[in-house]
Image (cartoon, rainbow, N blue to C red):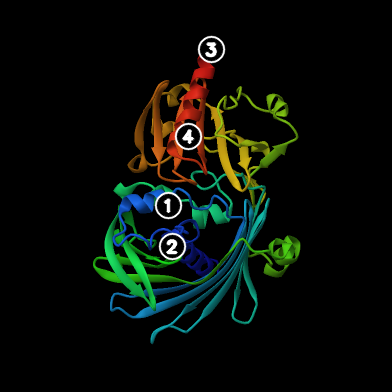
Amino acid sequence: MRNRYSRNIALTIGTVLLLSAITASLIVAGLGRPSTVSADVICQVTSEALRDMKSVHITISNLEYNDEGRVFTETTEDVWIEFPGKFHSVINVTDVGPTSENSRIISIAKCDGKDFMFVTTDGQGEVHFVQLEKNIPHWPGGDFFGYPHYALYTMPVEGLLQDKSNFKVIGEERVGDKPAIKVELTMQRGSADGEGDATNYLFVDKDSGIVLREELYAGGQLARRIEITSVEMNIDIDPSRFEFDARKELDAAGGRVSVSDHGYTAVANVEELDAVLTYKYVLPPYLPSGYELYEAGYVDNTKLVTNNVPDTPNPVWEQPSFFIYRNGSSFIYVAQDALKEHQKGNPASTTGMPGFARQEIELSGGKAHFYTMGDSSGTLYFEAGDIKVRLTGFVSLEELKRMAEAMMENTRK
């Protein structure tokens, strides 16, 4: 049953990553005004997305097709998100078709702002598997395990649609009874199932700006169609929706469980980090207007365990510290770690991110490397003295660069 769980969670997460433009690409009013919408317009309005979003409830429908063009998997998902860290999703996956058993898997994912739980059951409600991730670092995606709503829904979006080199406007089509702008993502990305290069199309509602549909083509064949069936923003969500009884679920699953502790430890004040870190952190001397320190913490390596077996520390980020800055519902995330001698000047070694996604940027204090991942414009990696730093958040790339240059300058004084 574990293999079946793994297959379905990979399928579902792949589905959501492909449709990650949904919640973040709530491309606001303005797309319907000009007769022809340009990539520049989409970049402009996407940069304003999510700024005032406090909560969202969306329902998603997904159909997957085989090589003959027939549906073999149907997935529906009901998602509640309360920013910055609470999440609840109910996922129904049904195998269909003449050779299937019409089997059904129901998965429930919850995050209460600190811990994350994923439970799979069959159509009769029997628990098949439970995954519990404790003390998740406050980091949206990348090589840290981020909160689920960042990793699965909002993380890649603005990095794609803020840069017009990543997409092009194809024209206009109707999705149901709604006029939509058709956008092709031009980035070369493999499909969720490793099928090789794939082509993605987004269909953006001209009236509301919401992405109504995404279509994935592999080898010219429609492989996946995902649609938003409903969306509500900035609504009141019952707090109990994000709560869970981990012990009850673990007991129900018997031995079919996975428990991990990621070691994120919040501190009462920044000065407490001096006693636990092996390096000296650098607070950003410059912050965009309105942002103030909201939380600081670090990853406690003594807690890095999976099923009570110590994990090998990440060879790149061994003891990252986190500084989270908040402006209303918007956040900036700053992570730092010691820069080892063999990592200096080697961005692949320093960041742990794949080279194909890297874009080199010249700053006044040296080179930085930019990835179209993370909230807002992406994630910026750079070296500041004897530390390595990564920045992301609800701000533009220009603001990230200003923050990076100020931190570089501070370490040279």
- Would you call the spot at circle 4 few (<14 residues within 10 Å), some (14-19), or many (20 or more)? many
Residue picked out by circle 1: 45
Residue 152: x and y, percent? Answer: 51, 57
- Local packing at callout 3 (Cα closer than 10 Å; few below 14, some 14-19, many 20+) is few
User: Which residue is labeled 4 in the image?
Assistant: 400
Q: Tell me the CA gap for discs 1 and 3.
A: 39 Å
Q: Nearer the viewer, mark 4 or mark 2?
A: 2
**Label ID, residue 403:** none
- Amino acid, disc 4: Leu
Q: Is residue 188 above or below residue 389?
A: below
Q: Is residue 146 above or below residue 11?
A: above
Do callouts 1 and 3 mark residues in contact (Cβ within 8 Å)?
no
Look at the picture and state if 195 lies above or below 339: below
Against 84, residue 295 (above or below) is above
N-terminal label among 1 and 3: 1
Say what amino acid the circle numbered 1 marks.
Val
Q: CA–CA distance between discs 4 and 1? A: 19 Å
Q: Earlier in the sequence, mark 3 or mark 4?
A: 4
Q: Amino acid at mark 2?
A: Gly
Q: From mark 3 to mark 4, how far is it between C-alphas?
A: 21 Å
Q: Badge 3 is on which residue? A: 413
Give the mark toward the camera: 4 or 1. Answer: 1
